[in-house]
Image (cartoon, helix red, strand yellow):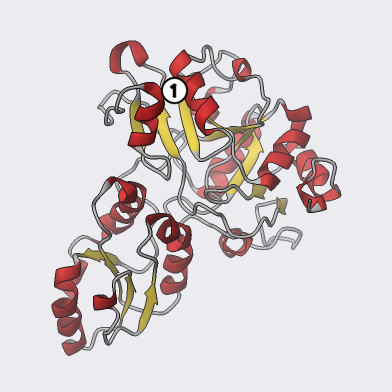
Amino acid sequence: MNPDLHPDSERIRAAAALLEEGKLVAFPTETVYGLGADAENPAAVRAIFAAKGRPVDHPLIVHVARNAHLQRWAREVPSQAQRLIDAFWPGPLTLILPRAPNVPAVVAGGQDSIGLRCPSHPMAQALLAAFKHGQGGIAGPSANRFGHVSPTTAQHVIDEFGTPGERGESLLACVLDGGQSEVGIESTIIDVSRLDTHGVVLLRPGRISAAQIADVVGDVPAMPDRAAPRVSGSLEAHYAPSTPLALVATEHMSALMQRLCERGRRFALMYYTHDAASSAAAVRLPLSADPQAYAHALYATLRTLDMKSCELILVEQPPQDERWQGVNDRLRRAAFDSAGVVERLL
């Protein structure tokens, strides 16, 4: 076992101590890197919102250890929630539960619900085990400026916030490096706080699919309604590179790329089929046709293309089946503010 993955390792103990002091610590999870603070310290939680430029009514997910007492965070844990915990924790699943009275409202964006997740990354597990003897909670949104592409490596975090320890360079006290995140997109979020009125509700898709949820709870989760709790990543525009991004169906790619070339436009291409590979794009980066492998590389690829000084990032639209639901959700939000960009360039 890597000694840095043990709760008693010097690096993990130091990071846990910084959290207890109210400092911000970036840490790896299997989904993306999180920007962590003590979830029971309102001042530390507010520092997350300030560092990210995140609206204060946009709730944070609280990460808990494998053996945490959930009653510390939730007024109740319904049987459907417990079945999901037994099936998917530790793992990329966040559950929205009724918030316990002692949990600061600021971490929940002022709502009466709380998002809880138990991450599977061994370094996250070690940090949670060391922090407050395994019974604390680490509020941990993605470690990037609000609305930007989420980080899947420690270097991505440093690119956003600077290197810790360099005076004036970073808002973070520490960045734990756990390699590249395995999943690559944020967790599935399931609302189990309104079972009597709405049943189980899928608020954000991720690697864990609606079908997998249904296999555990017995019903296909409903889609979000107007009264659903606000959750991370639910705004229409999110996960966006600075370069405008357009999603294009495979059958329209060749003609569009030819027109862009005729206009002398410098564009980047992210694709997954052989048919889209040959083009005059300034930069071409292929992704896998497997949805899990695609998700793993998605954010890192967007960050790479964002640095290529292009006028546009063209993304070949992935398939629309359920296995791609999480990827398509992130790409749709990343492209939201770029509506009409192709027409303007042509």
Left or right: residue 54 compared with residue 244: right
Amino acid type, callout 1: Gln
Residue occupying the point 39% across, 66% down:
288
On the image, numbered disc 1 is attached to which residue? 111
* Picture layout, residue 45 above or below residue 75: below
Quadrant hosting residue 254: bottom left
Residue 43 locus on image (x, y percent) = 64, 33
Whether residue 100 is visible here, answered yes or no, is: yes
Residue 150 locus on image (x, y percent) = 48, 55
Quadrant in the picture for the C terminus: bottom left
Residue 84 locus on image (x, y percent) = 47, 26
* Picture layout, residue 199 above or below residue 297: above
Disc 1 crowd rating (10 Å Cα; few below 14, some 14-19, many 20+) is: some
Residue 192 locus on image (x, y percent) = 41, 21
Q: Nearer the viewer, residue 254 or 17?
A: 254
- Secondary-structure class at tag 1: loop
Q: Nearer the viewer, residue 90 or 25?
A: 90
Q: Report how many numbered discs are placed on residues in the image.
A: 1
Q: Nearer the viewer, residue 145 or 195?
A: 195
Left or right: residue 195 compared with residue 342: right
Quadrant hosting residue 107: top right
Residue occupying the point 65% across, 53% down:
171
Whether residue 20 is visible here, answered yes or no, is: no
Residue occupying the point 69% across, 60% down:
168
* Picture layout, residue 54 above or below residue 249: above
